[in-house]
Amino acid sequence: MVSDPRTEASRRRTFAIISHPDAGKTTLTEKFLLYGGALGKEAGSVKAREGRRSATSDWMDLEQQRGISITSTVLQFTYGDCVINLLDTPGHRDFSEDTYRVLAAADAAVMVLDAAKGIEPQTLKLFEVCREREIPFLTFINKWDRPGKAPLELLDEIEETLVVEPTPLTWPVGIPGDFRGVIHRGTGVYTRFERTARGSTIAPEEEVDAERAAIDDGEWWSAAVEEVDLLDGVGRVVDPKTFLAGESTPVFFGSALTNFGVRFLLDGVVDLVPSPAPRQLADGSRRALDAPFSGLVFKVQAGMDKAHRDRIAFVRVCSGRFERGITAIAERSGRQFSTKYAQTMFGQDRDTADEAYPGDVLGLVNANDLRVGDAVYVGEPASFPPLPAFAPEHFMRARVTDTSKFKQFRKGVAQLDEEGAIQVLRDEDLGDQAPVLAAVGPMQFEVATYRLENEFGAPVELSATPYTIARRTDDQSAAKLNAMQGVSVLSRADGTLLALFESKYWMDRVLRDHPELTLERMIAEGGLN
């Protein structure tokens, strides 16, 4: 029986996890999978086909070596009657452009805070992206099993720094470092947790009545009750309307490492994160959920399967019912392409996708015409608002060190460019011989060189350039700019022209002396630095 897209969409919860590095985002992602039944008996043992290695959200070798997330991943699992599409984002600021694109595919976000550090610089910048994209977010205050700030102090910090009202749904019993359990403010129930070995299994939970809690947990229980009464008195209760409007954030306390409070957060995702709604199109109208299939390409990735070295376009389904094998159209090129090899994603691992509904994420294998930001559709054409590019601030010239590997070098650079892993700028005189790699953050160069050598067999050397800032320009202005000292105009593969300046001072002087020239700012000047 064919399901109605609107009914299936109501079961979907598609959200991203964002955080400052080391706040515990990847650990929390793994524990979501544990509670969703997507792991084996222990965390870290993901169900996979026999003979295949386990899947993790940090699948790239370099991620595992560095211990940080440097590329976004998609993990789909069921929880109760809901289908959860979890988008794990890079935490490092150098990969903020990838995070921005992922948020374009999400309906909400979970912001993870370290209880000892509170709002960190990257947390603030990621929040600003959520606000710009009108993404509602829940807050998980993590690492409550370690020393940290007082809970009321953290609420004040959230409110003052983010200018959003924190509305706790759970409240901790016990100070940071001596975590006993949480009071669920919706039910009034106190749940106490027990540790498990290395947090590898679901934490046993026990509901404890007030009389026993007063005896067992003494002053910690009394303090928690007083604080809950204070929150009630000032009206700090979860309000779905203000949450969806981005004016408030439901707050949960816990420890991803020990699994304390994780279930309550996952329940909060199901109860509060909105199901997919009709998606806004480029002309301002909205495409109905039950309209023919349409989707947004928000990510392109190669090298996920070393055995096949294929290329995957990640597509957020926006409307209709997707059926494997249908012929879809790429809106930018107008070309048809087959969806015979559509797959669902679980980190690096994947399975054949026979169908999908709004909110789901598909991996379209070897749909080589697709680029980040493209719309795909069946029937009535669809075009979504463009995904803006970030302004790079770091520029290095790349050359292959072994000229016999130039073909691999050119192919690898083109692939990284298509993925948006790094911006590739070309001089018409040099072409692909020595392109300039432009990055939001310097770690993107490390990833690019690593992938060129390990995925494409093209070892490269990077050399410094004098450029420090870029502005978008046009053909008419390019001729005049190229004639000046301290500025070069290079082109991206999509035809966009960027004027690179050696200093902001020189750029400001050119703007002052030549106001007729086109020099446009790009989004998030300096990325999310």
Image (cartoon, helix red, strand yellow):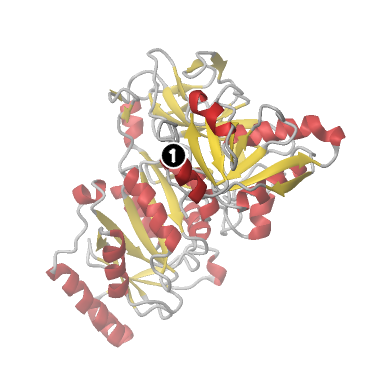
Q: Nearer the viewer, residue 515 or 195?
A: 515
Q: Position of residue 500 (x, y in %)?
A: 56, 40
Q: Position of residue 272 (x, y in %)?
A: 29, 49
Q: Is residue 172 visible?
A: yes
Three-letter amino acid code of the residue under disc 1: Asp
Q: Residue 211, relative to residue 245: is it above or below? A: below
Indicate the secondary structure of the residue bearing disc 1: helix
Res 404 quadrant in image: top right
Q: Nearer the viewer, residue 187 or 1?
A: 187
Q: Position of residue 518 (x, y in %)?
A: 44, 31
Q: Position of residue 283 (x, y in %)?
A: 31, 22
Look at 25% across and 75% down and name the residue there: 209
Q: Residue 173, relative to residue 356: is it above or below? A: below
The residue to which callout 1 is attached is: 513
Look at 64% across and 37% down and name the residue there: 416
Q: How many C-alpha atoms fall within 10 Å of the one at disc 1: few (<14), some, or many (≥20)? A: few
Look at 46% across and 18% down and name the residue there: 331
485 left or right, relative to 229: right
How many numbered marks, from 0 up?
1
Look at 27% across and 23% down and name the residue there: 285
Pick the quarter of the image with the N terminus.
Answer: top left
Q: Nearer the viewer, residue 238 or 486?
A: 486
Q: Residue 147, relative to residue 88: is it above or below? A: below
Res 284 quadrant in image: top left
232 left or right, relative to 338: left
Q: Is residue 522 visible?
A: no
